[in-house]
Image (cartoon, rainbow, N blue to C red):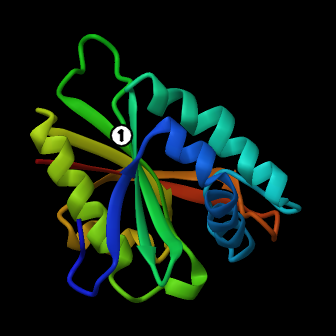
């Protein structure tokens, strides 16, 4: 798949994750060091980042419970997003959007939007009709999600620590019927 600007979009298998672990680690590490509120705090090393992909993402991908979509540009992984389909038996129609990441070198180029549009298409093809997510309140991603039709459920104040500054930030919970 190719986005309009030549960015290549592809889903990675568990074996692909193994082969691209350094690139995935570099993406996550750059985002965390750039201030992204994606569950990690500084210091955050390349090995910490690679451990996340191996231990938290790869098992779900291997079991078919999670999809990992990446965007590649200029030979580098420029961004990624995940669709977590590991829902309870009474929620087979729903999935969670997690870890939308765009490397600081590639921001403001439409990569996040392209990743989300493709991921929503996959969710529809798989029979999912409701997507949920959360994002740091006031973060740059919040208006992106709103522009894609996500509705705000509410804000949980003091939800998590800022990755480098140590203060508590709120999280905005959102959903979209697709």
Residue 150 appears anywhere in the view: no
Residue 61 position within the rendered picture, expressed as x and y whole percent measured from the top left: 46, 33
User: In the structure shown, which secondary structural element does the residue marked by tag 1 occupy?
Assistant: strand
Where is mark 1, residue-wise?
Answer: 96
Q: Camera-side residue: 153 or 67?
A: 67
Q: Camera-side residue: 98 or 37?
A: 98
Quarter residue 115 falls in: bottom left
Quarter residue 124 falls in: top left
For residue 48, above or below residue 143: above
For residue 33, above or below residue 126: below
Residue 71 appears anywhere in the view: yes
Residue shown at the point (22%, 73%) measured from the top left: 147
Residue shown at the point (69%, 77%) measured from the top left: 34
Residue 53 position within the rendered picture, expressed as x and y whole percent measured from the top left: 63, 44
Residue shown at the point (81%, 69%) measured from the top left: 164
For residue 74, above or below residue 61: below
State the quadrant of the N terminus: bottom left
Residue 171 position within the rendered picture, expressed as x and y whole percent measured from the top left: 52, 55
Mark 1 crowdedness (10 Å alpha carbons): few <14, some 14-19, many ≥20: some
Residue shown at the point (44%, 22%) measured from the top left: 63
Q: Residue furthest top?
A: 89
Q: Camera-side residue: 177 or 63?
A: 63
Residue 99 as seen in the image, left or right of residue 49? left
Q: Camera-side residue: 57 or 129?
A: 57
Residue 10 as seen in the image, left or right of residue 166? left
């Amino acid at each position: 798949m190719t986005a309009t600007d030549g960015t290549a979009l592809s889903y990675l298998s568990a074996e692909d994750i193994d082969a691209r672990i350094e690139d995935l680690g570099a993406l996550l590490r750059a985002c965390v060091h750039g201030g992204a509120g994606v569950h990690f705090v500084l210091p955050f090393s390349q090995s910490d980042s690679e451990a996340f992909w191996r231990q938290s993402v790869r098992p779900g991908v291997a079991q078919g419970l999670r999809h990992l979509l990446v965007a590649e540009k200029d030979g580098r992984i420029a961004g990624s997003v995940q669709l977590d389909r590991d829902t309870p038996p009474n929620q087979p129609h729903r999935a969670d959007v997690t870890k939308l990441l765009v490397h600081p070198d590639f921001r403001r180029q439409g990569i996040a939007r392209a990743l989300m549009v493709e991921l929503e298409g996959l969710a529809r093809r798989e029979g999912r009709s409701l997507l949920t997510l959360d994002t740091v309140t006031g973060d740059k991603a919040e208006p992106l999600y709103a522009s894609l039709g996500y509705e705000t459920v509410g804000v949980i104040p003091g939800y998590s620590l800022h990755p480098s500054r140590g203060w508590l930030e709120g999280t905005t919970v959102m959903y979209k019927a697709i």
